[in-house]
Amino acid sequence: MEREACTFSYCEKPAIVEKEVDLLIIGGGMGACGAVYEAVKWAKPHGLSILLVDKAALERSGAVAQGLSAINTYIGRDNKPEDYVRMVRTDLMGIIREDLVFDLGRHVDDSVHLFEKWGLPIWKAIGTDKNLKLEEGGVPRRTGRWQVAISGESYKCIVAEAAKSAMASYDKAEYLERVFIVKLLLDSKEENRVAAAAGFSVRENKVYFIKAKAIIIACGGAVHIYRPRSVLEGMGRAWYPVWNAGSTYAMPFQVGAEATMMENRFVPARFKDGYGPVGTWFLLFKATATNARGEDYCAKTEYIEKYAPYNKNLGTCIRNHMMIEDFKRGLGPMYMNTDKALAELAKTIDAKHAKELESEAWEDFLDMTVGQVGVWLGNNIEPDKMPSEIMPAEPYLLGSHAGCCGLWVCGPEDLQNDATRKAGYVWEYKGKIYNRMTTVNGLFTCGDGVGASGHKFSSGSHAEGRIAGKQAVRFILNNRDYTPSVDKTADELAAEIYAPMELFEKYKTVSTTPYTVNPQYITPKQFLFRLNKIMDEYVAGTIGWYSTSETLLTKALYYMELLEEDSYRMAAWDLHQLMRAWENYHRFLTARMHLRHILFRQETRYPGYYYREDFNFIDDANWRCFVNSKMDPKTGEIKEFKREYVQLIPD
Ligand code: FAD
């Protein structure tokens, strides 16, 4: 089924804004802020123009919107980038791009030092009492081997301010907020080269058509692909930010970019219903998590014997698996023993420090998940006096946290060998290698966008944005004679983007309740519910404890085909709904990639994240490799295939 043509006979035609810049950055989160900060520096001496476009407002956009209480990736004096690679490899079950992870490890601290310079309070530890004192001076205070504690309620504001200041310092750099990018466009004269992007303002009746010599896409991960545990009025309360809808994966895939490890996902085990953070509780407060009988589910090694050799170190998914096994045996609920942890700590320190520490514990929630407090209040839970339930949440797709789906990118030149070159870790464009460039020439990514290299977190995403920013400028300078050309007109793009508005206006009188039921269209919310239902029930959602099989996945593919037809019949009655419609289309494309990758990989690489019940084992001989996929932008044909994993850092 095709989309019905929009002729603007029913809905108002938007104003069209056309722009042409050297570098376009899509997104305004940690990666994009890093990218623009760095790009300005390198672009300025050459007079290159830069435009950053965010669907929201930089000050509070992206996953760090609410603030954070820890920077999760800091190498510091105690670690080496090699150690970081080992940690990431272990946690992501043996398959990562070690060139990218090492590269991140050697650069990430510089971003952390910048954050501090820009005003982010990083806690310091001095003397021997280094786990307990909050004092000036000294080294950043660790809450775990890789984490440092921050007073981070305003983390994103600080990082955004630095990005805006960089742009303000240069008359050829600007940003647009509240502009949602819908699609990328390839060059009409040069094969496989990105040339433009198109989107619309979510506040004004305007469509944007932006041509660029290079584009960095950094729109975060994908949320609400799966039916969340909190439904109806609670739906907006998810662990990852609901406004990241898979745009990073969907748009590049549509123009032919190769994706990698899209079968991977992250299932965060968090405080039930409020999604409050558990890391600081485990790492800093040494809290224990137990089942309803008070048993430590992570001690039940019999649950993981079948996943040898990955049963030695308890990676994030494996710990989930152990919890899930206990749940299945009727041993839930699971509890985080916040009360006991605080009581134990109080025994080891004086009253003043104990109080200080307790307030830190609560700050952990106020900094980044204030909604948790509502759950406690509503349920009469006093977390200093009683334990709180924890639970594995619905799956999220991301590439920067404890997950690694994303795009296949070119690695840094200096870290390659014959094996990695053969495996396609690097390639040349007109004789030069560009770090973090996707397989579409001129299109770069970072943060959640770069696949097979998780555990970057906020600091790593910023640092990776800086790498991409510098490389994109280098790409533009090396190809200065290029002029983007696109075979679509701005009017055609506007008609495509506004099609859901036209559909609504055209058919709204066909039913008496145009916002809920209509034989001619479906609402964005109805589309989302159908997508969530398919993904939850067939593609290893929470409803079946993350289990699926070839037969279920095949059925899901069939339902997805029907859903794709209906994606062309999503209707929108205002700009907000128009954004919802396009977000859902991005979600749909991302979900289908996830489904197809899970179907392709015939093993259970990530027990605790998902299970292929028909291949419930880890098969290193056949599957310790990347699963990649690609869509032919001309025919729409999608193919999955393997790429070799190369170990660069010894165990
Ligand atoms: P984001 O920062 O999410 O930015 C995405 C940007 O894209 C946003 O500006 C968004 O508005 C924009 N966007 C999306 N779609 C479009 C579109 N179509 N058009 C235009 N713009 C678009 N890290 C830590 O270091 N420590 C922690 O304690 C920690 N805890 C976390 C807790 C939670 C609940 C979450 C969700 C994340 C946490 N992280 C933590 C990880 C960190 O937040 C991410 O790694 C990081 O933000 C990823 O950066 P990014 O630029 O890829 O995406």
Image: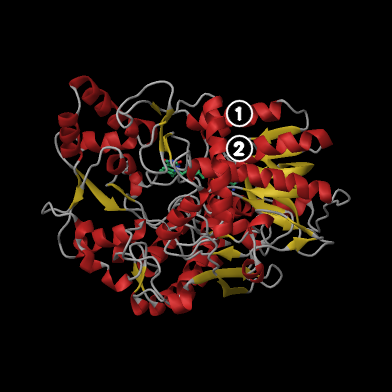
Indicate the position of residue 275 as horizontal and vertical percent values: 33, 44
- Cβ of mark 2 under 8 Å from ligand 1: the answer is yes
The structure residue drawn at horizontal position 89% and vertical position 50%, both measured from the top left corner, is 481
The structure residue drawn at horizontal position 12% and vertical position 51%, both measured from the top left corner, is 294
Q: Which amino acid type is marked by label 2?
A: Cys
Q: Which amino acid type is marked by label 1?
A: Ala
In the picture as drawn, the residue positioned furthest to the left comes out as 293
The correct choice, above or below, for 562 with respect to 578 in the image is below
Kind of element beneath mark 1:
helix
The correct choice, above or below, for 343 with respect to 331 in the image is above
Q: Residues within 10 Å of mark 2 (few under 14, many from 20)?
A: many
Query: Which residue is label 2 attached to?
Result: 33
Q: Which mark, by number, is residue 577? A: none
Q: Using the image as rendered, state which of residue 638 and residue 571 is in the foreground.
A: 638
Indicate the position of residue 503 as horizontal and vertical percent values: 60, 55
Q: Is residue 118 left or right of residue 286?
A: right
The structure residue drawn at horizontal position 32% and vertical position 61%, both measured from the top left corner, is 318
Tags 2 and 1 in contact by the CB under 8 Å rule? yes
Indicate the position of residue 4 as horizontal and vertical percent values: 65, 62
Q: Using the image as rendered, state which of residue 140 and residue 602 is in the foreground.
A: 140
Query: Which residue is label 1 attached to?
Result: 162
Way the structure is coloured: secondary structure
Indicate the position of residue 207 as horizontal and vertical percent values: 70, 44
Quadrant the N terminus occupies: bottom right
Q: CA distance from mark 2 to mark 1?
A: 8 Å
Quadrant the C terminus occupies: bottom left
Q: Is residue 438 left or right of residue 560?
A: right
